[in-house]
Image: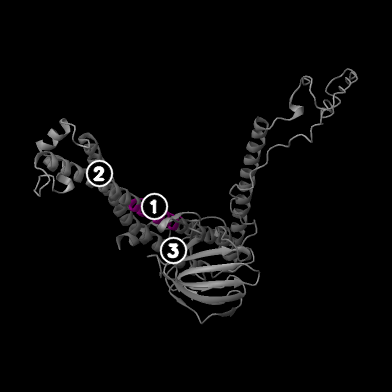
Amino acid sequence: MSLTLTLAVARPSVADADHGGSAAQDAAAEIQAARDRADTAAQALFDKESEIDQLEVSISTAEVELAQIEGEAEEMREGLEYQAVRQFVGAGPTSFPLLIDLDDANDSLSAGVYGSVASETANVDLDDFDAVMTEVDEQRDSLASRRDDAEEATRTYAVLQETAEAEVELLGQIEARRLQDEAVQHELDEQQRQREERERLEREATDEAAAAVQAAAVPATVATPAATPAPPPETDSPLPDQSRPATTDPTPPTPPTPIPTTPTAPSPTPAPAPEPSPTAPVPPTPAPDNAGSDLACPIAGPRSFADTWGASRSGGRSHEGVDMMSPGGTPLVAMEAGRVEFKTNNLGGNTVRLYGASGTRYYYAHLSSWEGSSRPVAKGDVIGYVGKTGNTSANHLHLQVHPGGGQAVNPYPYARRACG
């Protein structure tokens, strides 16, 4: 409760937007600032979710490793016990101090075991056993530390969720008051266009820089004849000079030396520069610059974005969608005309598959409920409502985009363009 009040006090009043410039500009700036805050809060929330999932994977791995090393220590303990019994008691049944829990094994080793080691009748070395027990203790400490980290991350996640939900609620209030004027929406659209242009220029600059680095690396790995200023030594190549420009030497060229008559098989076409291996992994195809420009925003209400493409998820999965926060019950609409199918699964809860008329398939997850039944839909038709069913605790839409019905691509550019 105190957190929500703090957030509300810290925000500018929606009644004091006109601080300079037109009222529409000020209102649009206020809305955009609220959207940016909501986006930042959503990003922090889902980044923490990814951290928790990574910790869960790490804990599972550590538990397996601990079980293995404890098993090894148990086998060594039994070996020491057996050796001591044979050395000092004989083959008959007896009890021995080594018949104890692993935690107390080192402290309870009998002097008889040391005697068996001294007489070289033991097959298990006590130093090795001690080293294994030390590793057991270290693995247990490490596992306990990871569990503590996971608990702390879970507590932090709860705070971040409260913050993100409060921000998107506040965004809804601001939009409800400010978006009544068409001039404000026009100004928002213009600000979005300018932002997209800046992002496009930044991407182009990044691509050009990457291309320049790649081009600069080529001469270091692939030598070309023109890169060598001096003529090459004598060679058996049938065309020693034709690959060099005629202007490299200002003096008239010397007639070429006749090729020896010794029959030699001419070298085939010189080996080309090595090409990338066809088996090398191909990165996902990036979304085109106009991705989402003709689509309806899937959330018909206040929303915030988190670019979570590729983030770690429970079970060692990789996130293949974009997470969009919105209050529970907010309507969800078809991004384009097509056909919808409603299904339920463990991870996504209530889900929708929208088979768009363009061939693109869209996947909506975590819905609280559906609108109607599986059917053909028009662009913008309500198909369900935001919820938190399935593997989540926060009201949000998990959206995937599959161009041509194929592999998923990063849907963040699509959602950002469609929703602003």
Among numbered discs 3 and 1, the one appearing first in the sequence: 1
**Residue farthest to the front, as pictured:** 91
Q: Secondary structure at mark 2?
A: helix
Q: Nearer the viewer, residue 167 or 47?
A: 47
Q: Nearer the viewer, residue 92 or 118?
A: 92
Determine which residue is flagged by label 2: 136
Give the number of the mark in front: 3 or 1: 1
Quarter of the picture holding the C terminus: bottom right
Determine which residue is flagged by label 3: 168
Residue 71 rendering spot, x and y as whole percentages:
26, 48
Q: Is residue 318 magenta?
A: no
Q: Is residue 259 above or below residue 311?
A: above
| Amino acid at dot 2 | Val
Q: Quadrant of residue 214?
A: top right
Q: Which residues are magenta?
A: 40-60
Residue 167 rendering spot, x and y as whole percentages:
42, 61
Q: Residue at x 23, y 39 (%)?
A: 134
Q: Which mark is residue 54?
A: 1
Q: Is residue 134 above or below residue 240?
A: below
Q: Is residue 378 above or below residue 138?
A: below
